[in-house]
């Protein structure tokens, strides 16, 4: 017995170490990390090294706990401004998008796999949710600086679509297991009512659970070593409590993390570091267990239809669902195309595909194997192309900051304050004489091994180490002051235009200088307001607006989203790649209005030209005779 414990510990630890080392390969070559984790699990399973693992309940239990940890960390790290910015598109994708994907995929699966309609929709629900963890790893590994709006949409969608896909999957498993054949209307009614109850209870528990976590952390004077474990345990209690009363535990734990992460919770720096490590460990464990549970020798029997379903999901179902969901929003077509392509399927889809086995369904193993192959197809095709596609669509923007050397230190009893240690970089604004804001209190400066008060140092120099006492929600302005200038790639040298434009100047001056064809109402605006209006009411860093012969580029915005710096280019380069589909509602309306306007012009032109082109009609002879008499 003792020998078995040692052996199991050795094998388990070796698998985790192998998965951790595989991340180095992923960072080096930009490979999908989830794919590597799954391959390690497959290689050590029944058809690989021969480690037997066929416990569906244990796999689902471990995967669910790991997913709860990942969702709490995802919510904790999502800032409210990102949620506000992407709430509409992301929630539309997470609700209507999941339903559309389930329906489209299930309809095709019914004919390719000879499953019943309910089983086909069950398979569609299992693969309807996306896995953002793989996406954001690829963006970081490839050093891709993506537009913030696109990144926020993908992040919020991934955190909110899992609970909906899980509800659909479990509900369909229960219906099929009960051998029920409900009418379509009754089925839809039951699903809608069950969905509202499940999500409503999950949201209530999550909100109150998040507030309770913040209150307990602030009230209890726990040791900093125990505090992260305490918060993690509370998050799992929120997850379990919501599920116990019939709510969505996954939605509850995500909302609890969102509330806790955006509040003035104590020791936020320590919590973030701990949860980041726990999230990595949870991902590794979940992916390895799911890889071990699979049996690759069963794949060849369904390989062809499963691959075809994976291709249908990538090239048809997901793009149609994304386009229909994002029609009401004025997102540029390249952004919509990128969101549709980056709908990677991952561990959640495989985890949900285990539920038919738990329910004892006749085709449970077929559904699981098909979902596993679909995930592999998604990771291989989409996972390797995220970076190149983002560059092709012009969604990569130059970095805002250059190298920054900063250390965050949380002090005991500091009452929501932190001690930041900056190293002054050559060429940074503070090295050039910029003043540090009054709300930041520099307390110590280290120079050449000597420590002195900030007031006695005079002007800061490159290489100085500055210790500043600030509130834990300090603005990002400090990072800008201490960072060196970002290194601009030669291809991005003209990205922000050759000329600077004051956003406070009148747009009428643009009309006078370049004649871009502004309307009377637009000439009354400032240049900054004009750009914001052309962007649909919200501007972000590196947005571009083409107005006649000129292009205006957003160089910077403040914390409230107001444009503070603009660039102007006389050689527009914005449309890197044109996407013929994915028109938004605004673009569709604009095209309809333009079509009607041109049609009316042609009608008026024809009616005006008709008398001149027509030959004069011959006059009757009687009239001529009368005139002559």
Image (spheres, rainbow, N blue to C red):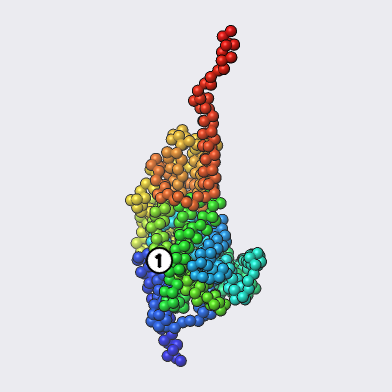
Is residue 202 or residue 625 the one in the foreground?
625
Residue 115 seen in the current view: yes
> The residue tagged with tag 1: helix, strand or loop?
helix
Toward the front, the furthest residue is 621
Q: Residue at x 42, y 47 (%)?
A: 575
Q: Which quadrant holds residue 33?
A: bottom left
Report the label total. Answer: 1
Query: Which residue in the rendered view is the most extreme toward the top?
Result: 629
Up the image or down, 246 lies above or below 589; here it is below
What residue is at 54 percent from the left and 75 percent from the top?
356
Q: Quadrant of residue 5 in the image? A: bottom left
Q: At which x and y percent is residue 629?
A: 58, 7
Picture coordinates of residue 75 (x, y %)?
Answer: 53, 65
For disc 1, the marked residue is 380
Is residue 456 or residue 114 the one in the foreground?
114
**Residue at the location (48% across, 63% down)?**
313
Quarter of the rendering containing residue 206: bottom right
Measuring from the top left, give residue 403's x and y in whole percent: 38, 58
Q: Residues within 10 Å of mark 1 (few under 14, many from 20)?
A: some
Q: Is residue 308 above or below residue 585?
A: below
Q: Note whether 223 is above or below 78 in the view shown.
A: below
| Residue found at x 53% / y 19% | 618
Q: 123 or 518: which is nearer to us?
A: 123
Is residue 500 visible in the rendered structure shown here?
no
Residue 625: x %, y % from top left: 57, 11
In this rendering, position of residue 2 left or right of residue 253: left
In the image, 221 versus 54, the foreground residue is 54
Farthest residue to the left: give it: 490
């Amino acid at each position: 017995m003792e020998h078995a414990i040692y052996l199991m510990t050795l094998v388990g630890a070796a698998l985790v170490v192998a998965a951790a080392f595989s991340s180095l390969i992923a960072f080096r070559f930009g490979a999908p990390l989830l794919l590597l984790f799954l391959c390690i699990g497959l290689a050590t399973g029944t058809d690989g090294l021969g480690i037997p693992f066929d416990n569906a309940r244990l796999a689902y239990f471990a995967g669910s706990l790991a997913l709860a940890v990942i969702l709490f960390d995802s919510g904790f790290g999502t800032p409210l401004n990102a949620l506000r910015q992407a709430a509409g598109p992301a929630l539309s994708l997470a609700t209507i998008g999941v339903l559309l994907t389930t329906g489209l995929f299930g309809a095709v699966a019914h004919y390719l796999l000879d499953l019943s309609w309910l089983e086909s929709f069950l398979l569609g629900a299992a693969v309807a949710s996306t896995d953002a963890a793989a996406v954001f790893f690829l963006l970081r590994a490839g050093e891709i600086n993506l537009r913030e709006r696109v990144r926020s949409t993908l992040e919020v969608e991934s955190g909110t679509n899992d609970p909906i896909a899980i509800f659909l999957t479990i509900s369909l498993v229960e219906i099929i297991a009960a051998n029920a054949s409900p009418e379509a209307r009754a089925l839809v009614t039951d699903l809608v009512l069950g969905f509202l109850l499940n999500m409503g209870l999950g949201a209530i528990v999550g909100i109150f659970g998040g507030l309770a976590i913040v209150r307990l952390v602030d009230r209890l004077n726990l040791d900093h070593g125990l505090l992260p474990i305490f918060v993690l345990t509370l998050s799992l209690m929120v997850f379990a409590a919501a599920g116990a009363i019939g709510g969505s535990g996954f939605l509850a734990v995500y909302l609890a993390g969102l509330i806790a992460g955006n509040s003035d919770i104590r020791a936020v720096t320590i919590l973030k570091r701990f949860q980041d490590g726990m999230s990595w460990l949870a991902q590794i464990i979940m992916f390895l267990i799911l890889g071990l549970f699979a049996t690759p020798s069963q794949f060849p029997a369904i390989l062809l239809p499963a691959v075809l379903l994976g291709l249908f999901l990538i090239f048809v179902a997901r793009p149609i669902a994304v386009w229909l969901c994002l029609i009401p929003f004025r997102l540029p077509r390249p952004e919509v195309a990128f969101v549709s392509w980056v709908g990677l399927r991952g561990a959640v889809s495989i985890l949900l595909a285990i539920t038919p086995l738990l329910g004892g369904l006749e085709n449970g193993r077929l559904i699981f194997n098909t979902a596993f192959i679909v995930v592999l197809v998604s990771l291989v095709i989409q996972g390797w192309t995220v970076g190149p596609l983002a560059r092709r669509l012009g969604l990569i923007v130059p970095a805002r900051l250059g190298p920054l050397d900063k250390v965050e230190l949380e002090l005991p009893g500091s009452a929501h304050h932190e001690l930041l240690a900056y190293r002054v970089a050559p060429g940074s604004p503070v090295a050039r004489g910029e003043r540090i804001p009054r709300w930041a209190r520099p307390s110590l400066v280290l120079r050449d091994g000597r420590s002195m008060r900030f007031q006695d140092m005079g002007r800061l120099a490159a290489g100085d180490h500055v210790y500043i006492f600030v509130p834990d929600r300090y603005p990002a302005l400090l990072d800008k002051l201490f960072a060196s200038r970002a290194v601009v790639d030669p291809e991005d040298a003209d990205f922000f235009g050759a000329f600077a434009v004051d956003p406070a100047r009148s747009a009428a001056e643009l009309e006078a200088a370049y004649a871009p064809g502004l309307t009377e109402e637009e000439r009354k605006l400032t240049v900054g307001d004009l750009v914001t209006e052309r962007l649909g009411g919200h501007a972000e860093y590196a947005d571009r607006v083409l107005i006649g012969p000129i292009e205006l580029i957003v160089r910077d915005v403040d914390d409230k989203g107001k444009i503070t710096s603009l660039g102007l280019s006389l050689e527009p380069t914005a449309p890197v790649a044109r996407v013929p589909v994915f028109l938004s509602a605004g673009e569709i309306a604009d095209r309809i209005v333009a079509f009607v306007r041109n049609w009316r012009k042609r009608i008026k032109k024809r009616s005006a030209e008709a008398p001149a082109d027509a030959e004069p009609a011959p006059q009757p002879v009687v009239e001529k005779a009368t005139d002559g008499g």
